[in-house]
């Protein structure tokens, strides 16, 4: 829980203004270097292997690097896992889940940075609606949270959204 909450708080710490709009102007030669830096800072063989299968945005890599470089010790001090936080921010799932704990971690990774509705999308949709003063969307967060379920199917943990 602590890792998820801190990851939610820090997931956009490397965002620049208008990041989503102008991200394609970033120097992508630096992106490859950033990927190498992230893997090196994580210093975790399984993360390195799984990271090959994900394609995070530039600012997600940068946010994960900031956490591992500047806040790793603080995460540990608060009883949180900085490597899992980097996974959550970059959307880097455990590819071969060895145990139920990794399957549950995958649920939380997708909850912060997934393909459908996730905390990151809800964050910027609500923020952009408020900043633009245009009430173009109404999101019932309590209903969404009340619809999330973790199920244990024949010894296998999985996550699903009920809409």
Image (cartoon, rainbow, N blue to C red):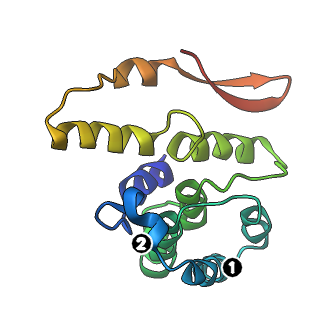
Q: Residue at x 65, y 46 (%)?
A: 105
Badge 2 density bin: few <14, some 14–19, many ≥20, Cα 10 Å: some
| Residue at (48, 81) in percent of width and height | 69
- x then y, percent, for residue 20: 41, 57
Question: Residue 145 lies in what quarter of the image?
Answer: top left
Could you say which quadrant of the image residue 45 lies in? bottom right
Which residue is under mark 2? 74
Pointer 2 with pointer 1, Cβ within 8 A: no
Which of the marked residues, 2 or 1, is nearer the chain's N terminus?
A: 1
- Residue 149 showing in the rendered view: yes
Residue beneath the point at 67% across and 40% down: 104
Residue 61 to residue 39: above or below = above
How far across and down, in percent of the image, does residue 16 sit?
33, 68
Q: Is residue 63 left or right of residue 107?
A: left
Judging by the rendered image, the residue that carries numbered circle 1 is: 43
Camera-near label (2 vs 1) is: 1
Residue 122 vs 32, above or below: the answer is above
């Amino acid at each position: 829980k602590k890792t998820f909450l801190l990851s939610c708080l820090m997931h956009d710490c490397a965002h620049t203004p208008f990041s989503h709009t102008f991200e394609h102007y970033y120097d992508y030669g630096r992106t490859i270097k950033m990927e190498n830096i992230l893997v090196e800072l994580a210093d975790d063989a399984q993360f390195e292997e799984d990271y090959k299968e994900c394609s995070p945005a530039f600012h997600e890599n940068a946010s994960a690097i900031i956490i591992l470089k500047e806040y790793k010790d603080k995460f540990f001090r608060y009883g949180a896992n900085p490597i899992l936080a980097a996974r959550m921010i970059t959307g880097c799932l455990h590819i071969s889940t060895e145990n139920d704990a990794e399957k549950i971690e995958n649920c939380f990774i997708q909850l912060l940075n997934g393909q459908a509705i996730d905390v990151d999308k809800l964050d910027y949709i609500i923020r952009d609606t408020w900043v633009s003063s245009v009430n173009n969307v109404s999101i019932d967060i309590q209903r969404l949270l009340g619809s999330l379920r973790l199920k244990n199917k024949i010894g296998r943990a999985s996550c699903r959204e009920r809409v």
